[in-house]
Image: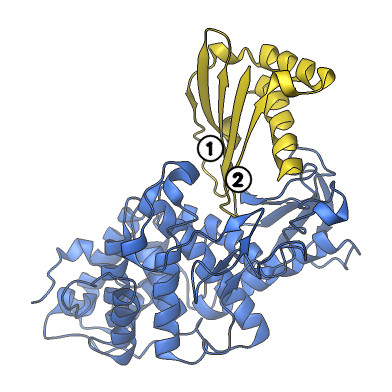
Amino acid sequence: MLIEYERSGGFAGMRMTTSVDSDALPLEQAEEMRSALEKADFFQLPSRITAETGGADRFQYRVTVHAQDIQHTVEVGEAAVPENLWSLLNLLNTLARTRR
Amino acid sequence: MSTHHHPLNCILPPHILRQIADQGTPQQRNKALQTIDATARLRGQRQAFSEVIAVAPGAVATGKERLVYDAEHGSNLPGRLVRSEGQPATGDPAADEAYDGSGATYDLYWDAYQRNSIDGNGLHLASSVHYQTGYDNAFWNGQQMVYGDGDEDLPPDQRLFNRFTIAVDIIGHELTHGVTQYEARLIYWDQPGALNESFSDVFGSLVKQRQLGQTAQQADWLIGQGLLTANVNGIALRSMKAPGTAYDDPVLGKDPQPAHMRDYKNVIYDNGGVHINSGIPNHAFYVTAVEIGGFAWEKAGRIWYITLIDKLQARSNFQDAARLTFEAAADLYGANSLEQQAVSKGWSEVGIDVGGESKGCLATLFGANQPTRSAAP
């Protein structure tokens, strides 16, 4: 399973990306990732989730998951992230920050 | 060529209209009052109108009311109140910087433009610090300012960002998003979004320049100086003087900001590049300010301020901003004044023509029989 992650926006306006091959992850991390995807019900999420709350300098996230016979992309603004998607975004964000 | 406006679309600064309403002939007074009413409706507010009727000049309380909260590394806002207006320093640099920086920003808006806080009506200035963990960002959530601590969770040799309260222009930037929300309401997408970002950088930088007592010539025009750690090859996040030169780092990449329309970046991320293309109007302001000379918040800042509160609308683009700052310069300093020429030069250096001439709204509304007025400061 391949997961692509992009975070853009924010005050700094810097784009941060990473891609993760779950087969290449340590077993424990791969399990965390699988569990976070399940918790988010990722493949059922709308492809674009936006918030009407206003504000500025929030992050924008874009996650694409390529699984065996399915591929899905979700774009979501920080203020609109569904509660059950945060585990996945936090995992990916930590990976991206420590890898860069 | 002369630029003609429908009178209702030509918005004069309220203080000039108030002066005409107070001191003009009966016809001038009627016209000024009608315009104030139309302006208020256009802005969705009755404030300008009621001020003429009810409030004597100088009667508004200053109303600097700061509240600083500690989010204690969580996501719940605002968090625990740690310092309110008039209380002594807490000893926590983030909390005290948020307090001092929002105070310096309030003072710029009040002392230079007689604006009473974010909404013009004394709204409290709420800030939360220590938001989440490893949160390398600051934002305005529609009601308050929020600051992360940067990369405090990483080993020192991997940290790229310091705490986001470290530069006063970041605080001025976030607070100005609040002002924009109450005034031009620029949508946060593409060119209106990049203008929204640019106005935040402009007034953020002016807060810093005023605090340091620097002229346009002396100022560094950097946004976020001190935010990047020594591990990064960069001096700041953005440069209004030389967009695209603030950092160039193997890990963070290169500052992507353009300084000219020919380098405008059409992208879908970052809400259509709002933090990227803001380099273009940022540089236009820088050129204007240096061209006028002196303290940038006094004249260039006033032109941009009046444009933000009385002229721009939600979907205004760069071309509109150029035309309207040019018009505001005529309103404030006269058609073909040095200040107005400086605005024209500012935009032309980034590849935007201000579009013909503008004699300003006084000429549009009152024709040859313009009421007399005292010059803006």
- The relative height of residue B304 versus residue B371 in the rendered view (above or below) is above
Q: Residue at x 39, y 77 (%)?
A: B303
Which amino acid type is shown beneath numbered disc 2?
Answer: Asn
Left or right of residue A35: residue B332: left
Label 2 environment density (alpha carbons within 10 Å; few <14, some 14–19, many ≥20): some
For the residues labelled 2 and 1, say whether their Cβ atoms are less than 8 Å apart: yes
Give the CA distance from mark 2 to mark 1.
8 Å
Q: Which subunit holds the residue at mark 2? A: B
Seen from the viewer's position, the closer of residues B71 and B88 is B71
Outermost residue, top direction?
Answer: A69
Outermost residue, left direction?
Answer: B1
Q: Where residue B352 appears, x then y in whole percent? A: 27, 69
Q: Secondary structure at mark 2?
A: loop
The quarter of the picture where the C terminus of chain B appears is: bottom left
- The relative height of residue B157 versus residue B282 in the rendered view (above or below) is above
Q: Residue at x 83, y 58 (%)?
A: B83
- Palette colour of chain A: yellow
Q: Secondary structure at mark 1?
A: loop
* Residue marked by disc 2: B141
- The relative height of residue B285 versus residue B34 in the rendered view (above or below) is below
- Palette colour of chain B: blue
